[in-house]
Amino acid sequence: MSASPDRSAQVLVLQHTIEDSPGFLGQWLDRNDIPWHVFCAEAGQDYPASVAGYQGLAILGGEWSANDERPSLRHAEALILEANALGIPVIGHCLGGQLIARAFGGGVTRLSQPEVGWLPVRMHPVPEALDWFGATREAMVYQWHYDSFTELPPGARVLAASDACAHQTFAIGPHLAMQFHIEITPQKIETWLGDPGTVYPAAVRDGVATVESPDAMRASTARHQAGSEALADQIYRSWRSRWRA
């Protein structure tokens, strides 16, 4: 947790699992002198009862399914809806984006093939994409997911797509849901590769086109991490511009 001792935190970060830390998001908040609180459900930390008093809400990813019957996931959805009612912009990373979709009436299901590694996404030529991503029209971003928000909530606008995932990101009001991990760091990647579960190794063995092997992933990280951080800076600055003073 990072927070200034002489003022209340501006941002609440919900962390579901221990291995899915805030990563670059935490670095960006610290770099911009933005005080923040993080609560990790898997570490036994209850999420706050309310988001009142915060200016932004960020929700991280994790290996859980958004459809799992876990109290912390339903609590996160309730906080998303409360944030919306209070005018607090929400940004969701992977599982976090899926919870935004569910909270507003969308649906999350399994994709026909997983996306794991550095893969290209194409931004749609819509005003909301320009607002969130700037002039970027295609980007290499980090993915590790088997599910996606395949059913969008009413009023959502799709902003980007990939070959395997038609809904890479959507905006709804002042909120942004991303399927990719813009908060990724090389350290997070190594943590995940150290305990990858069973689906990923099987996909590597099967030669799934949208799944990178560990060696290929590490080489891609060296090429694309700087670009990912630049895009993350753009996205997080756009999120911050929506905070109420």
Image: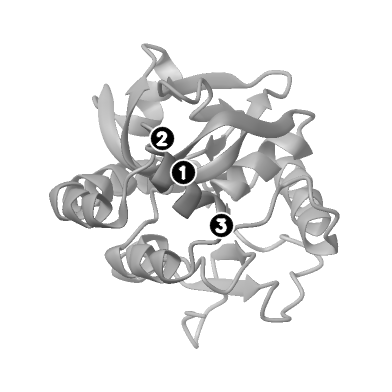
* Left or right relative to 63: residue 194: left
Give x and y (percent) for residue 127. Answer: 41, 16
* Sequence-first tag of 2 and 3: 3
Q: Nearer the viewer, residue 22 or 142?
A: 142
Q: Quadrant of residue 30?
A: bottom left
Q: Residue 206: x and y, percent?
A: 43, 39
Q: Residues within 10 Å of mark 1 (few under 14, many from 20)?
A: some
Q: Is residue 120 above or below residue 46?
A: above
Q: Which residue is mark 1?
A: 203
**Considering the numbered disc 1 on the image, is that residue within a helix, a strand or a loop?**
helix
Decide which of 141, 14 is in the foreground and name it.
141
Instruction: Please report contact status of discs 1 and 2: CB closer than 8 Å, yes or no.
Output: yes
Q: Judging from the image, what secondary structure is the residue with disc 3 in?
A: loop
- The residue at which mark 3 appears reads as 198
Label 1 or label 2, whichever comes before in sequence order: 1
| Residue type at the position of mark 3 | Thr
Amino acid type shown at disc 1: Ala
In the rendered image, which residue does mark 2 sit on?
208
